[in-house]
Image: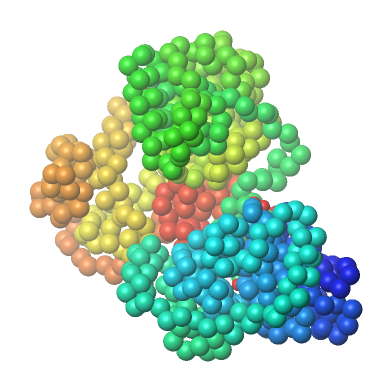
């Protein structure tokens, strides 16, 4: 049984025991449905305590059911039945009560929680809105302004805040159920409060609603669910509980069947699966207590910050005192952006030991190299690391393009070597490409995945190829965008189409920001090696001194101190010899062409065994390259397009 019942002197304790997260799947709903009737009929029961087994109350509706039609009993009907029960129900919450898990507590007459409880309605992150009364009951308990934040802006309430707002009636200590039982006996001595759905709902300030609308639309960047969650709240304000419930359910069911929600569910499961690759099941990772970072530039600083954010002690090594001082200053600047108390900030930076020379790395369990992208420089670093580090220390490179096998050549114990490709800014970007060489030992690979988990990153394993998974697709994407340009589409039209699809920036704006010179130098190096690399439009711009924002212009012009791209007649003149006569393409056609190019590269990457499964490619794009989350990723899009035809 997934729902357990125990009778304790007048109180029935109903425990949802449905590992791993006590989700409200059909079996749970069915059992709760019949228990409401059974307990109402049981004269020995005066009140009911509803709780979850293990560390959490309820993680929500069972998301795996969302690809199928709703199976009765539905959650709204179940919650209405609990609310209408003759015996009062008391929700006893520890850990999380999320989504349907929070909604079921709103159907209870009372809520008690431990201080560590976290209550939230994260539905909008799954492309839906609450579907079982969250938008209608919550504002009746905590007021419309706070409800907006929880329902449409994904605010999580801790136990203490939930008490302040009136969502929870009492904070209790463990043992939770014993204390909930005491609470239940106590409330039975007084008249019961009205069920939540019967409570009045104060009118909202129109200015506040308008401000919320603007804020939520801006943050949603085209995602459907957050503004609709707000609209559902407003509908209830204007039309009352019953109509509000009917409207909420209709919107919920509509969104549940939407491509956006399907994409977000797909990523939800892909992200969890990514942390536990099946071939590493049973492989024990190595303990990592202290981490060395070699190179205190852009990436070294970001990596050190990510490690400190996970409370790992760091040794940061630079080549000279001036570079070390610059790196440490950069680290302090990164830290300041966090929300730490003075004491915590001291501890954060205090956990970094700066050093010149590699001796300081002797007792590190893992060392991550992030020096210049130059094979000779990197090899020299690993020669030193091989000499100084413990033979069991894991040694990693953050190279973007160099073949890790070449970097590791000559390293003693090559089984401990691995590529850990972080993305800039490394303390922010979620993606970690993990690049084992053929020699890398399974424990070392498992250690890399373990590190990703500790740093709250999304790990994706990549085989060795030029650019690994992400940069390889990026190159193809850019080439396809340049081809569109050569075919006569305007850079601004291409950028606008990709922004319309959900990217924060289009491909040309992105290049102007990052600098056109990096890929230019890369092509030049290949040409110098005798490879045939045809001239590209980007080459023309760089040769004319237009390297992007940093030179005041690239694909676009930029006014001093202003990052807004302006169409550039000079760029048009420089590029003219390479471009076909102008033509107007529909945004959908532009998006289709560029997505097809990304997916085709993804297919090639899969065929070569560089990525194991399509979801890995989508995780790389979403977490490393700004692919809009609500679109799932290029492979997800391609599979949907294939299903349509
Ligand atoms: N339904 C189905 N499976 C779920 C689930 C859910 N709601 N939540 C988690 N799982 C699964 C995960 O996929 C994972 O499965 P595997 O072990 O097979 O990979 C397993 O449960 C454990 O999940 P986590 O690794 O995430 O465990 P955690 O301890 O780190 O976190 C959690 C637990 C905080 C509950 C987290 O899983 C979470 O945030 N879950 C989703 C919460 C959510 O969005 N709920 C709203 C659902 S929608 C809803 O409720 C709509 C409605 O109103 C009707
Ligand atoms: P950077 O030029 O900002 O920093 C490199 C740092 O390494 C400099 O501070 C330099 O003083 C130091 N250094 C050089 N030789 C050293 C040595 N022998 N010992 C100790 N320190 C030494 O470069 P960045 O951008 O941080 O890149 C570092 C590595 O990360 C490169 O391999 C790069 O390809 C890779 N990378 C860069 C990304 C980016 O967006 N910048 C993204 C992902 C990977």
Residue in the foreground of this view, choosing between 26 and 635: 26
Residue 283 left/right relative to 439: right
Left or right of 634, for residue 119: right
As drawn, 511 above or below 321: below
Task: Kindly identify the residue that appears in the image at 59 percent across and 85 percent down.
Answer: 198
**In the rendered image of this protein, does residue 408 appear above or below residue 188?**
above
Where in the figure is residue 627, as x and y percent of width and height? Answer: 42, 55
| Ligand 2: quadrant of the figure | top left
569 lies above or below 375: below
- Front-most of residues 538 and 448: 448
Asked if residue 180 can be seen in this view, the reply is yes
The number of numbered discs placed on residues in the rendered structure image is 0
Task: Give me the residue at 14% from left, 38% from top.
Answer: 544
| Rendered position, 411 above or below 158 | above
Q: Residue 44 location, x and y as percent? A: 89, 78
- Residue 372 shows in this picture: no
**Residue, x 42% and y 49% (percent of image)?**
625
What percent of the width, then of the height, locates residue 407?
50, 22
Give the quadrant of the N terminus.
bottom right
Furthest residue in direction front, as rendered: 189
Q: In which quarter of the image is residue 48?
A: bottom right
Left or right, 147 with reference to 328? right
Between 521 and 13, the one nearer to me in the picture: 13
Spot occupied by residue 71 in the image (x, y as percentages of width and height):
70, 80
């Amino acid at each position: 049984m997934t729902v357990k019942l125990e009778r304790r002197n007048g109180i029935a304790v109903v425990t949802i025991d449905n590992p791993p997260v006590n989700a409200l799947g059909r079996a749970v709903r069915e059992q709760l449905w019949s228990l409401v009737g059974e307990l109402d009929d049981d004269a020995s029961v005066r009140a009911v305590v509803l709780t979850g087994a293990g560390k959490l109350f309820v993680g929500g509706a069972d998301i795996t059911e969302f690809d199928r039609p709703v199976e009765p009993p539905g959650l709204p009907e179940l919650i209405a039945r609990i609310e209408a029960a003759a015996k009062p129900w008391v929700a006893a919450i520890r850990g999380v009560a999320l989504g349907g898990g929070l909604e079921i507590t709103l159907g209870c007459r009372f809520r008690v929680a431990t201080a560590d409880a976290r209550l939230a309605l994260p539905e909008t992150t799954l492309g839906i809105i609450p579907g079982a009364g969250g938008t209608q009951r919550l504002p009746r308990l905590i007021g419309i302004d706070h409800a907006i934040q929880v329902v449409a802006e994904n605010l999580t309430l801790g136990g203490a805040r939930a008490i302040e707002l009136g969502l929870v009636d009492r904070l209790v200590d463990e043992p939770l159920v014993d204390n909930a039982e005491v609470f239940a006996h106590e409330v039975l001595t007084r008249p019961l409060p009205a069920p939540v759905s019967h409570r009045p709902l104060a009118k909202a300030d129109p200015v506040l609603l308008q401000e919320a609308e603007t804020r939520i639309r801006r943050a949603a960047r085209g995602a459907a669910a957050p503004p609709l969650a707000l609209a559902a709240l407003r509908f209830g304000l204007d039309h009352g509980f019953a109509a509000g419930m009917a409207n909420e359910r209709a919107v919920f069911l509509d969104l549940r069947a939407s491509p956006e929600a399907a994409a977000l569910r797909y990523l939800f499961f892909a992200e969890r699966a990514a942390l536990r690759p099946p071939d590493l099941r049973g492989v024990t990772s190595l303990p990592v207590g202290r981490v060395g970072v070699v190179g205190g530039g852009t990436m070294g600083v970001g990596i050190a910050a990510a490690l400190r954010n996970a409370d790992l002690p760091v040794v940061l090594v630079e080549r000279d005192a001036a570079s070390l001082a610059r790196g440490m200053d950069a680290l302090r600047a990164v830290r300041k952006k966090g929300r730490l108390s003075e004491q915590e900030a001291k501890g954060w930076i205090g956990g970094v030991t700066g050093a010149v020379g590699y001796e300081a790395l002797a007792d590190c369990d893992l060392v991550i190299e992030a020096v210049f992208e130059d094979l000779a420089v990197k090899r020299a670093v690993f020669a030193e690391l091989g000499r100084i580090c413990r033979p069991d220390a894991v040694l990693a490179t953050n190279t973007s393009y160099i073949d890790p096998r070449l970097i590791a050549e000559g390293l003693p114990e090559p089984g401990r070597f691995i590529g850990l490709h972080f993305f800039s800014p490394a303390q922010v970007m979620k993606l970690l490409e993990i690049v084992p060489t053929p020699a890398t030992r399974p424990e070392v690979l498992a250690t890399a995945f373990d590190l990703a988990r500790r740093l709250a990153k999304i790990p994706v394993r990549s085989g060795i190829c030029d650019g690994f998974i992400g940069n390889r697709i990026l190159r193809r994407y850019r080439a396809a965008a340049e081809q569109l340009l050569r075919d006569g589409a305007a850079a601004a039209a291409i950028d606008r189409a990709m922004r319309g699809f959900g990217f924060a920036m289009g491909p040309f704006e992105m290049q102007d920001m990052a600098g056109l010179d990096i890929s230019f130098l890369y092509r030049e190096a290949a040409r110098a090696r005798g490879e045939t690399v045809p001239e590209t439009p980007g080459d023309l711009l760089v040769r004319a001194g237009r390297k992007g924002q940093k030179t005041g212009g690239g694909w676009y012009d930029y006014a001093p101190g202003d990052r807004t791209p302006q169409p550039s007649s000079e760029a048009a003149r420089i590029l003219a010899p390479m471009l076909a006569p102008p033509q107007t393409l529909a945004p959908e056609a532009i998006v289709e062409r560029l997505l097809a190019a990304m997916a085709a590269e993804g297919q090639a990457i899969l065929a070569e065994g560089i990525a194991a499964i399509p979801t890995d490619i989508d995780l790389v794009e979403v977490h490393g390259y700004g692919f809009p989350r609500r679109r799932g990723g290029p492979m997800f899009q391609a599979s949907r397009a294939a299903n349509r035809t």
